[in-house]
Image (tube, coloured by chain):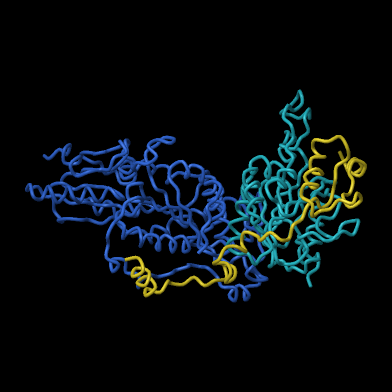
Amino acid sequence: MVFKQAESEIAAINMVVGAANSGVRAMTATSGGGFDLMTEGLSLAAMFETPLVILLGQRPGPATGLPTRSNQPDLNLAMYAGHGEFTRVIISPHTVQEFYHSAIRAFNLADILQCQVIVMSDQQIASSLFGIDMDAFQMQDTLIDRGKLLTAEQVDAMPDYKRYKLTEDGISPRAIAGSSANAIFLTTSDEHDERGAITEGAEMAARMADKRLAKAKVAESLMRPPFCYGPEEADITFVCWGTTFGPVVESVKQLETQGTSANVVCFVDIWPFLVQAAQHALDGAKRLVGVEQNKTAQFMHLLRAETGIEMQQIITKYDGRRMTPEYILGILEVK
Amino acid sequence: MSTVQDFSNDIRPTWCPGCGNYGIWNAIKRALVAAELEPRDVMMVTGIGCGSKMPNYMHIPGLNGLYGRTLALATGYKLANHGKKVITVHGDGDGYSMGGNHLMHTVRRNIGIVDIIQDNHVYALTRGQYSPTSRSGWVTRTSPEGTIEKPLNPLAMALTQGATFVARSFGCCRIGGPDRQGAQPSRLCADRRDAGVCFVQ
Amino acid sequence: MGYEWYRDNTYQLTDTGHDSNDRMAAIERALEYPGGEGKIPLGIFYQNNDTPSYEEQVPVLEAGPLADQPLRKYPIEKYRELLDELF
């Protein structure tokens, strides 16, 4: 592994795009303002169809905000960052173990889909220390899946190789430029044809746009549904995403001791959004309570936009301090 | 042994007749042949501008990235695959204006990149606004009374920041090949081993 | 400013006995344009082959380009060794 501290986040995102185009796996990590600077590079990576992993550690904004504190205010930013339309994957792990496994999975997803994967974290978990048994990490089960990446030998047998070949699933067999005499091609930020040459053609432009977005279907098939913690039937169903899971679980446990049954539906895989899986998980819930750490309930809006499902109560916290079970239970309306 | 033809494709450049880019284009091809490099040994990284379309007009692996980010893209590539000869080709707007910060850091890092700046002192693709190297008083669309700013001195900047190879040529000269006076060849065609950054205006 | 202008307003550093190993002399030459009144110097201002490049100083790259190094699982025993070393 090569680690490089770049002169700026703009340099960092371009460096990882450059590195990934040599065939290595590459990632960068940042938080709000740094991620803002990277957005142009995300758009570039999408046009290049370069596999990439970006860790976004959230903290309260706007601007410098509360730079050493924690929040979940950047879901909308992660979803919409970068000009143009393209496929990306967003996952937001809920525990330290899940972050470990998500890092491996994120690289696999990036390679399979030849797209960018944003892993969302926050300041709280990024600067916390946990004591966890090493066996919790199942390192022996690690799988490396590089998708349609071609070896030099495979490309040697492909005299008519096209880096951006139009395929049904939008994913082209990927040769590394310069790996073979058959793999001499341009990777350009301009619209391009199947060989990678710059084009202004209307038909090709539309087909390439279709290709870049067709990958979302494949991505959907690789996304996991939200998981449920607690009893199947409960009076209160909390809905959360990412690291808010911790204090919500504590709330469920405390409610149980008080004689109120509650459970949690937690979303780790955020985007592409699995509409049916979300509907299935929340179907029949008696009272839905959304919990997240931002002012405008960004995830609950996404959930409603995609499924029509509305929360009966939304609990938000946006003062830069960690969500706590005391805070949740203090304003929870039990009916 | 490669030939100039090995680095050529059949796409015609959109450059204006008489443009200096033709000279730079031919000089790079000749230098690559002189260095006994095959297309697959090279990575040409460019930015945005007329000249940055160069790898589209060559049979060469290329990364044609974003305006100003050429050197950052190339740095990432070089760190991941330093066995390749990495050549960046970009204009004065890309290199000094948007990418000025990256230029400074690339130079002081001494990373093995041959950086060729096509410096025509003007933003030509967007039809004539002043650039960081336009001389004071230059009348352009965005400076109808003449520019007020003093031009950047990129060579002096590169030298003071520790560049280990600094040269200037102009589009009608050969870059990199033994020059007209028969001086020693530049690193562009010296050998496959990069000894560090090579800055050519 | 076309070809003729550059032909008439430039000169080759090699014609003046410039020593391209002399950094201070190179800076003086660089300040001739822009900034000076005379012709524009062309050629090699400075070269120094003794300074190691960035990539030559990255230990992991001594084994060859990263792109050529195989991507493989880090053996689990190595993690245990690391753990024993730390605690």
Q: Nearer the viewer, residue B23 or A156?
A: B23
Q: Can residue B169 be seen here?
A: yes
Task: Tell which chain the image draws in yellow.
Answer: C
| Above or below A5: residue C78 | below
**Which tint was used for chain A?**
blue
Q: In the displayed structure, does residue A68 sit left or right of residue A44? A: left
**How many tags in the picture?**
0
Q: Residue at x 16, y 39 (%)?
A: A332
Q: Position of residue C30 (x, y in %)?
A: 79, 43
Q: Relative to A316, is B170 on the left or the right? A: right
Q: Say if A299 sits above or below C70 in the image.
A: above
Q: Is residue A207 visible?
A: no
Q: Nearer the viewer, residue B156 or A227?
A: B156
Residue lying farthest left?
A259
Q: Residue at x 91, y 49 (%)?
A: C16
Q: In the figure, what tint was chain B given?
A: cyan
Q: Quadrant of residue A18?
A: bottom right
Given residues B157 and A80, the one toward you in this image is B157
**Vertical placement of residue C46 versus A174, above or below:** above
Residue drawn 74% across and 54% down? Answer: B165
At horizontal 31% and vertical 35% (from top left) the residue drawn is A295
**Could you tell me which quadrant the C terminus of chain A lies in?**
top left
Relative image position of residue B130 (x, y in whole percent):
73, 33
Q: Is residue C38 left or right of residue A70?
A: right
Horizontally, is B169 left or right of B88 in the view?
A: right
Residue A104, given in percent of the width and then of the height, sits at 40, 63
> Where is residue A4 shown, x and y percent of the image?
53, 56
